[in-house]
Image (spheres, rainbow, N blue to C red):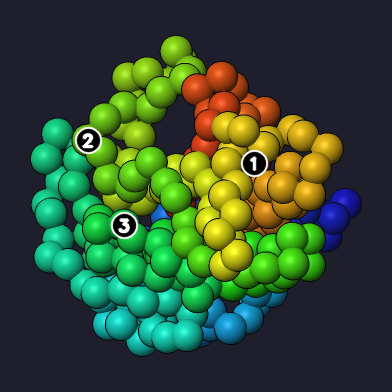
Amino acid sequence: MRVLRFVIRLLLSLAALATACAGLLWFNLVPPRFNPLSDIDLARPDAWFMDWKLARLRSDSGLCRRVLHKPWVEAQSIPNSPAKDGCGWTNGVHLLAAGNARLHAYRVTCEMTASLALWMTHEVQPRAQQMLGARIASVQHFGTYACRNMKGNPHWSGVRSEHARANALDVAGFTLSNGKQISVLRDWGKATPEGRFLRAIHAGACPYFRVAIGPDYNQAHRNHFHYDRGIYRKCK
């Protein structure tokens, strides 16, 4: 019985230690020189511990410069904006293109940019070629940085949005290389190639973003996909 109690205490201690380590990596609280994870590789959509590797980009500007490069992404570093009243950003970039598609966003975090590059490269572009017969030429969106609270849910109305940290993007639609326009507002939920494409790429966004919500989540998202790399997890 004494041995059994020892084993149980040991297992509980190990579980608590594992949970604590996971939390430190989730919130990116491990100093870069002590972080055991390798650099995220934008060529690999299925890397082990991908979420934690993406989180490393939150504050490591040197890692950001190593990771964000062609052909996966085109981006230019911008100065930090120290947090004020819950708004501002760290390790941000001016995004020009992701996954060989034009995607202009002036203020967006490095972490979010890498996630967008992975999603565009390994999910959106292959699905577009397969389901629509053309690649994505550009992405339309409703913005990244905005010093505001969350919208659409009264329970969170007093909480800063990830947009307030330049850590989110609202995707409204796409333009194909043949000129065809695809709109979340117009095409979502339809039994058309465009509707099926939108549903497929939205479902495929969950591995890359911590929050991936769209028209099925609530009325406030009827015309766009909201993606962010905050501290919460929600896919719908």
Q: Which x, y percent locates residue 86?
A: 21, 37
Which mark, by number, is residue 147?
2
- Judged from this view, the residue extending furthest toward the front is 179
Of discs 3 and 2, which sits in the foreground? 3
Q: Nearer the viewer, residue 157 or 9?
A: 157
Callout 3 amino acid: Ala
- Looking at the image, which residue is at 50% across and 42% down? 172
Residue with the mark numbered 3 = 105
Whole-angstrom CA distance, mark 3 to mark 1, is: 23 Å
Picture coordinates of residue 214, whole percent (x, y): 60, 35
- Would residue 40 be visible to someone looking at this image? no
| Residue 228: % across, % down | 46, 48
User: Is label 2 in a helix, a strand or a loop?
Assistant: loop
Nearest to the observer: residue 30 or residue 67: 67
**Badge 3: how crowded within 10 Å, few (<14), some, or many (20+)?**
many
Q: What is the distance, in whole Å, between disc 3 and disc 2 at their CAs?
A: 15 Å
- The residue closer to the viewer here, 220 or 129, is 129
- Residue 235 numbered mark, or none: 1
Taking the view exactly as shown, the residue that stands out farthest to the right is 1
Q: Residues within 10 Å of mark 1 (few under 14, many from 20)?
A: some
Gap between marks 1 and 2 measured at Cα: 23 Å
Inspect the image, locate mark 1, and give the three-letter code of the amino acid beneath it. Answer: Cys
